[in-house]
Amino acid sequence: MILELLLLGKTKDTYLAHGIDEFSGRLSHYCRLSLRYLKVKKKLGRTVEADVGEEGRLLLSQIPAGNLVVALDSTGRQFTSEELARQIETWELRGEKGISFLIGGPLGLSPAVVARADLVLSLSKMTFTHDMVRLFILEQLYRAYTIKAGEKYHK
């Protein structure tokens, strides 16, 4: 199974980029992982809603055919780390070929992306920057795989 993160733009903060690289490397020992950075074209004079809509269309257009879609949004379902590990195992047992994790930009995800998702996942009731969410989901995916493997990382 391939885990794919579709990301709008590059990670701006160096310390977060280093963390993303670290957990991407760790996670790649357990699964196939793809981080796809999508170029967002901003247009002057466009409304916030139009920007979010354009970002949503870009994300949706990049989902590989047949992939399960997980949208990261504050309105979504929250899992414990153990529950996420069981969910990944369920997807693997079902034979899912790929999971696309969609992370919005600074303005969040469009309603169309949330509506398209097979699962809407919330990492917390608190608000995080979209760059932090990239690191947090990678760490949680890594943690889930170490739980599945019975390793010590998860305490």
Image: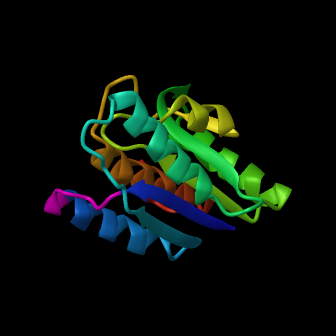
Residue at 61%, 49% in the rendered image: 85
- In front: 54, or 66? 54
Residue at 32%, 36% in the rendered image: 46
> Is residue 13 magenta-colored?
yes
Can residue 154 be seen here? The reply is: no
Q: Position of residue 80 (x, y in %)?
A: 53, 35
Residue at 59%, 71% in the rendered image: 31
Q: Give the main secondary structure of the magenta stretch.
A: loop
- In front: 11, or 28? 11
- How is this picture coloured? rainbow
Task: Work out which quarter of the rendered image holds the N terminus and state it.
Answer: bottom right
Can residue 81 be seen here? The reply is: yes
- In front: 82, or 88? 88
**Residue at the left extreme, as displayed:** 14
Q: Position of residue 15 (x, y in %)?
A: 16, 60
Side of 128 where 151 appears, left or right: right
On screen, 14 above or below 155? below
> Is residue 3 magenta-colored?
no
Q: How many marks?
A: 0
Side of 146 where 38 appears, left or right: left
**Residue at the front extreme, as displayed:** 45
On screen, 87 above or below 143? above
Side of 153 where 115 appears, left or right: right
Q: Quarter-wise, where is residue 21 in the image?
A: bottom left
Q: Position of residue 143 (x, y in %)?
A: 47, 54
What are the residue bounds of the magenta stretch? 9-15
Residue at 37%, 52% in the rendered image: 134
Side of 57 where 136 appears, left or right: left
Q: Position of residue 89 (x, y in %)?
A: 71, 54
